[in-house]
Image (cartoon, helix red, strand yellow):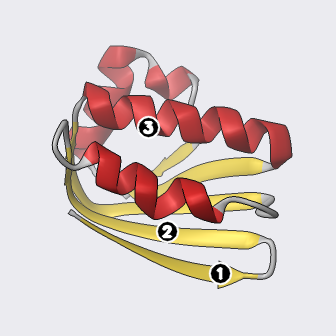
Amino acid sequence: MNVKRKENGSELIVTVSGRIDTSTAPEFEKGVKPYLDGVTKLTIDFGDVNYVSSAGLRVLLMLQKKMMAQGEMKLVNVTEPVCEVFEVTGFDEILTFEKA
């Protein structure tokens, strides 16, 4: 898994690639959470993410809660397999996302 960040004023754009599972979720969290101070818009590009486990969902939920307090969070380019995980788990009701 790989995490890249790009800051644009108060917006943080994060591009993630690979699997977000039990072994990579801590890396995903460390690649995003410390950079959220002063951010009012968080955009996470999931175009190259092909799998999200419950550990990855936990990180997304934590990020969503933090961003609700200071702005907004949106996932973009979400692949069909990941959309299915969101739908089965009910995260499609919690997260704002756009399909690929």
Instruction: State whether residue 78 appears in this view.
Output: no
Residue at point 64%, 70% (across, down): 12
The residue shown at (19%, 36%) is 22
Instruction: Give the residue type that dot 1 points to.
Output: Glu
The three-letter code of the residue at mark 3 reads Val
In the image, 39 versus 35, the foreground residue is 35
Task: Name the residue that disc number 2 marks.
Answer: 14
Quadrant location, the C terminus: bottom left
91 lies left or right of 34: left
Which mark is on residue 59? 3
Q: Where's residue 92, x and y in %? A: 48, 27
Residue 7: which disc?
A: 1
N-term-proximal mark, 1 vs 3: 1
Residue 46 in the image, given as x and y percentages of width and height: 37, 58
| Residue at x-position 43% and y-position 50% | 29
Mark 1–mark 3 Cα distance, whole angstroms, equals 20 Å
